[in-house]
């Protein structure tokens, strides 16, 4: 089985979010587990990648890509990283820029990338069984395969899979560009196949034309089928409901391994963690210049945005401090939230530690040194922080939404053998406060139960092995279409 991963970012070459982690980890695990198969990552050659001066980056050739009336140069390069073959598409005009996204011509940039990728696969002789597109950037490829290349012998048996990571971005463009960029007829718009709110949406197009569709957790899949939580996509997704699957993202268990992590002061595992967790807690508090009063530590590593529930954490800081707890927050984002966090630190300088920005080494310290991990998101398609926290024996406190609902089992005193964190439903400070109160009660009153919850969390198998097996099932189902 040959899989072409079509993506706008992938570790370790370029990253702006979790998409890069998923594409890299899924491809690595797929190649490792399926010796007679191969997943190849197709990716733009951004300026940031060129700046890395990759030693084994090999120039393979160049072509002219036809975009209706225009022809655009595309160089293509190859490199191998961790058993994964990367094919990088070069065009200085489109990708020789400081950032991955955020430009007024992003639609044109990724139209070029999509068309170039299909041409390059043919030239290098990589005939995929599955073209796996991620989000809107390569969203027109399934449409191209079934409309423009329907009678092309090279792509005759190629099927497509779409993974929706972020449904808020839909690749919107005027219908004029359907022909102007892709050479596709206006009839696809007139029939409604690619039309969304009066424009063309590359994401909707992928939903309509892909043989199978996935998203990053079972609960998020169900949320996307509702009007309230679908970002307008519920109608078209309901038409594809039988071909729509939710698969929880795995975790890079090599990078996040408390037994071997060089970024924490004391390594540990699920069989022996009490002393090591205390040492890591002391180190964390000292690093953030917070007094160690032997109470619990609540940690948070996050983008500081309205989605992440930072506002309802504010409602509970005083309560946590009064109950003897400390709070450590690492992140950056909305300036108003950053300012409020600074004010909280000024109000409780001995109990609250704040780092505005991102620091990977500090993030590992937060995961290892905290007792509880706050993740009260308004919505969270999958989430990775709660999974990392569980692996490090730090119990997550989450709202029941998306992947948080699928990965955290709330402790209710009747499920000590299976629970691995705390959760709440209503998005407000009172509901989060109730979950915090329950966590504090267990920590202070029944530490034996607290230890069992840590053991439960650390014993979870969060590797990419299980998730990859689910994707292989999706690939096989797509190939039967």
Image (cartoon, rainbow, N blue to C red):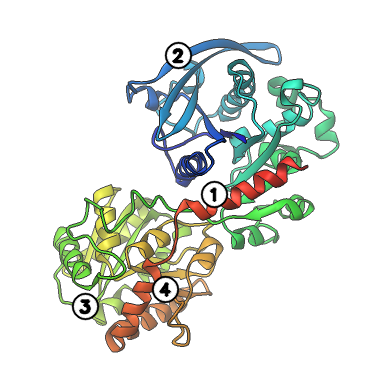
Q: How many marks?
A: 4
- Residue assigned mark 3: 295
* Foreground of the two, 393 or 238: 393
Q: Secondary structure at mark 4?
A: loop
Q: Is 25 left, or right, of 63 in this rendering?
A: left
In the rendered structure, which disc, 3 or 4, sits on the residue that comes first in sequence?
3
Callout 2: few (<14), some (14-19), or many (20+) C-alpha neighbours within 10 Å? some
Farthest-out residue, front = 36
Callout 4: few (<14), some (14-19), or many (20+) C-alpha neighbours within 10 Å? many
Quarter of the image for the N terminus: give it. Answer: top right
Tag 1–tag 4 contact (CB < 8 Å): no
Q: Secondary structure at mark 1?
A: helix
Callout 1: few (<14), some (14-19), or many (20+) C-alpha neighbours within 10 Å? many
Where residue 355 sits: x, y (%)?
25, 54
Separation (CA) of disc 4 from disc 2: 49 Å
- Residue assigned mark 1: 468
Q: Quadrant of residue 218?
A: bottom right
- Residue assigned mark 4: 421
Separation (CA) of disc 1 from disc 4: 25 Å
Separation (CA) of disc 2 from disc 3: 57 Å
* Foreground of the two, 333 or 72: 72
In the rendered structure, which disc, 2 or 3, sits on the residue that comes first in sequence?
2
Q: Nearer the viewer, mark 2 or mark 3?
A: 2
Tag 3–tag 1 contact (CB < 8 Å): no
Q: Quadrant of residue 269?
A: bottom left
Q: Quadrant of residue 52?
A: top left
Query: Residue at the spot x=14%, y=70% of the render?
Result: 291
- Residue assigned mark 2: 59
Where residue 464 sits: x, y (%)?
48, 51
Separation (CA) of disc 1 from disc 2: 31 Å
Residue 219's tag is none
């Amino acid at each position: 089985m040959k899989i072409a991963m079509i993506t706008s970012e992938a570790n370790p070459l370029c990253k702006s979010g979790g998409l890069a982690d998923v594409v890299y980890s899924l491809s690595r695990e797929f190649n490792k587990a399926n010796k007679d198969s191969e997943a190849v990552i197709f990716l733009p050659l951004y300026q940031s990648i060129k700046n890395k001066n990759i030693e084994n980056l090999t120039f393979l050739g160049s072509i002219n890509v036809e975009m209706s009336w225009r022809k655009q140069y595309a160089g293509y390069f190859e490199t191998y990283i961790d058993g994964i073959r990367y094919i990088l598409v070069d065009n200085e005009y489109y990708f020789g820029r400081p950032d991955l996204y955020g430009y007024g011509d992003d639609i044109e940039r990724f139209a070029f990338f999509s068309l170039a990728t299909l041409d390059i696969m043919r030239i290098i002789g990589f005939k995929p069984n599955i073209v796996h597109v991620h989000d809107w950037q390569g969203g027109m490829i399934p449409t191209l395969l079934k409309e423009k290349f329907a009678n092309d012998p090279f792509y005759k048996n190629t099927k497509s899979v779409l993974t929706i990571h972020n449904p808020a971005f839909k690749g919107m463009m005027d219908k004029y560009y359907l022909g102007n960029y892709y050479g596709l007829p206006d009839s696809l718009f007139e029939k409604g196949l690619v039309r969304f709110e009066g424009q063309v949406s590359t994401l909707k197009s992928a939903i309509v034309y892909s043989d199978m569709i996935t998203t990053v957790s079972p609960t998020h899949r169900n949320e996307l089928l509702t009007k309230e939580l679908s970002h307008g996509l519920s109608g078209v997704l309901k038409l594809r409901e039988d071909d729509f699957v939710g698969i929880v993202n795995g975790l890079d268990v090599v990078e996040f391994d408390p037994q071997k992590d060089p970024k924490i002061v004391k390594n540990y595992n699920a069989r022996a963690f009490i002393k090591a967790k205390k040492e890591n807690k002391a180190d964390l508090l000292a690093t953030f210049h917070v007094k160690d009063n032997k109470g619990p530590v609540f940690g948070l590593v996050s983008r500081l945005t309205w989605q992440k529930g930072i506002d309802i954490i504010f409602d509970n800081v005083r309560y946590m401090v009064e109950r003897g707890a400390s709070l450590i927050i690492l992140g950056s984002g909305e300036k108003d939230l950053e300012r409020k966090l600074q004010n909280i630190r000024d109000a409780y300088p001995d109990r609250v530690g704040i780092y505005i920005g991102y620091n990977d080494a500090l993030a590992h310290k937060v995961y290892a040194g905290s007792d509880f991990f706050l993740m009260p998101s308004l919505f969270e398609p999958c989430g990775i922080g709660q999974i990392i926290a569980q692996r490090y024996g730090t119990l997550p406190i989450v709202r029941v939404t998306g992947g948080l609902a699928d990965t955290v089992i709330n402790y209710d005193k009747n499920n000590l053998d299976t629970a691995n964190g705390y959760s709440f439903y209503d998005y407000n400070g009172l509901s989060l406060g109730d979950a915090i109160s329950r966590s504090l009660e267990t920590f202070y009153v029944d530490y034996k139960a607290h230890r069992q919850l840590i053991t439960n969390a650390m014993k979870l198998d969060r590797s990419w092995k299980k998730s990859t097996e689910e994707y292989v099932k999706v690939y096989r189902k797509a190939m039967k279409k």
